[in-house]
Image: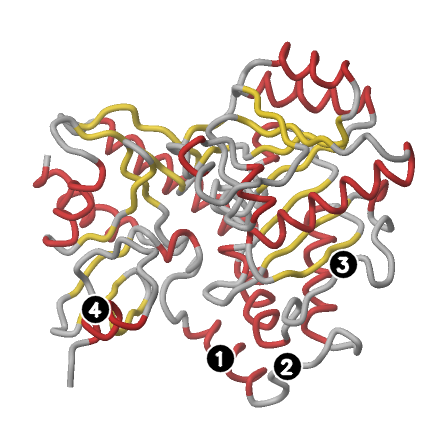
Amino acid sequence: MKSIKDIDKKYIMNTYNRYDLEIVEGMGVNAYDVEGKEYIDLSAGIGVNSLGFCEMGWVASVTAQLCKLNHVSNLFYSQPDALLAKSLCERTGYEKVFFANSGAEANEGAIKLARKYSFDKYGEGRAKIITLVNSFHGRTMATLTATGQDVFHNYFFPFVEGFDYVEAGNLKAIEDLVAKGGVCAIMMELVQGEGGVIPLDKDFVNGVRKICVENDVLLIVDEVQTGVGRTGKFLAQEHFGIKADITTLAKGLGGGLPIGAVLAAAKCSDTLGFGMHGTTFGGNPIVCAGANYVLARIDEDFLYEAKQKGEYLQEKLAEIDGIEQVSGLGLMIGFKVKDYTSSDFVKEGIKRGLIMLTAKQKVRLLPPLTITYNEIDKALTIIKSMV
């Protein structure tokens, strides 16, 4: 029989530049390859495995639901998604939620919600959405267009109309675009993850919020990567002292299963009516059972520990000779390594039993929120040996 790598290369479209590693199982922060070699995983499936691999309480919750009801159409009521919606809204102060299957789908829903809100109130011609240069919002046609990176804007012409891009920090440019009219929303990540793990300036964020309030422009905050405890707060917005009109979640919410969520404040929570939006798999009972367990685990003590671990990891990284430009919030961290490209550093890490990510020129760390200090120290020892 051919190896899994050979089968993969023959039958799966070559859209991923895979590393030379086949992971067959995992537990907690540790992954294991076909030969049983152990790896410390500081990627968490790009922020998805918020509780690590196969956390037993999460597995039990998902398994129990799997044995009870695997799927039901959204034409009917089911318990797991209703309870998840209640928990999310009560936790965040939002009025209602729409469940999708990914971050890109959640952002698509947010775009539709913002445009419908503006259409209902002001009519046609007010549908433009401002996003930030260096942002990343997904790979569907609309979210790819919303992504403010030229590298993604190729091949797939024509792109969706109605998006303008502004450099992060340029409040004047946003004011000028809004003053021209036609803007229904401003969409941004508070930490630009794929763009290099770069937190936005707090004054800029609050300035954008003020512009939105004064002009009835909806603020959409993409918390696909930053949400559900990743930054040491349940929502990254809490660090900035704001609340968006629309917030999108995904990744860590499901704990390892695909989910997306669009949280809507009261002013726009009833904007989308029957038949205006939908999805077959959104709110799936098994996925929502896992997400309900994740939310139950991530209490205030859990968040405080994640924040402290993130600060500890950033401090220790900054002390290592050869590492520079350490940035991030909580357990969402980026850094540059002298004399290494980010890709080469990650490849070397895999050879030494450490799984990391890249974000442009930076190495990116998104470890499970459950990582221990001992596991952090083990990872730091490997990193030190590489620099």
Identity, as a three-letter code, of the amino acid under mark 1: Ala
Judging depth in this view, the residue of 286 and 184 nearest the camera is 184
For marks 3 and 1, give the CA distance.
32 Å
Name the residue that disc number 4 marks: 32
Question: Which is nearer the N-term, disc 4 or disc 2?
Answer: 4
Q: Report the mark closest to the observer, 1 or 4.
A: 4
Q: Quadrant of the N terminus?
A: bottom left
Judging depth in this view, the residue of 182 and 72 nearest the camera is 182
Q: Report the mark closest to the observer, 3 or 1.
A: 3
**Contact (Cβ within 8 Å) of mark 4 with mark 2:** no
Residue 177 position within the rendered picture, expressed as x and y whole percent measured from the top left:
70, 17
> Counting other residues with Cα less than 10 Å from the Cα at mark 1, is it few (<14), some (14-19), or many (20 or more)?
some
Question: Which is nearer the N-term, disc 2 or disc 3?
Answer: 2
Name the residue that disc number 3 marks: 277
Judging depth in this view, the residue of 196 and 312 nearest the camera is 196
Q: Quadrant of the C terminus?
A: top left
For marks 1 and 4, give the CA distance.
22 Å
Task: Determine the residue positioned at 80% across, 50% down.
Answer: 95
Q: Report the mark closest to the observer, 2 or 3.
A: 3
Q: Is 27 left or right of 1, judged from the image as shown?
A: right
> Counting other residues with Cα less than 10 Å from the Cα at mark 2, is it few (<14), some (14-19), or many (20 or more)?
some
**Label 1: which secondary element:** helix
Name the residue that disc number 2 marks: 71
Q: Is residue 269 above or below residue 364?
A: below
Give the total of numbered labels. Answer: 4
For marks 2 and 1, give the CA distance.
18 Å
Question: Which is nearer the N-term, disc 3 or disc 1?
Answer: 1
For marks 4 and 2, give the CA distance.
31 Å
Question: Which is nearer the N-term, disc 2 or disc 1?
Answer: 1
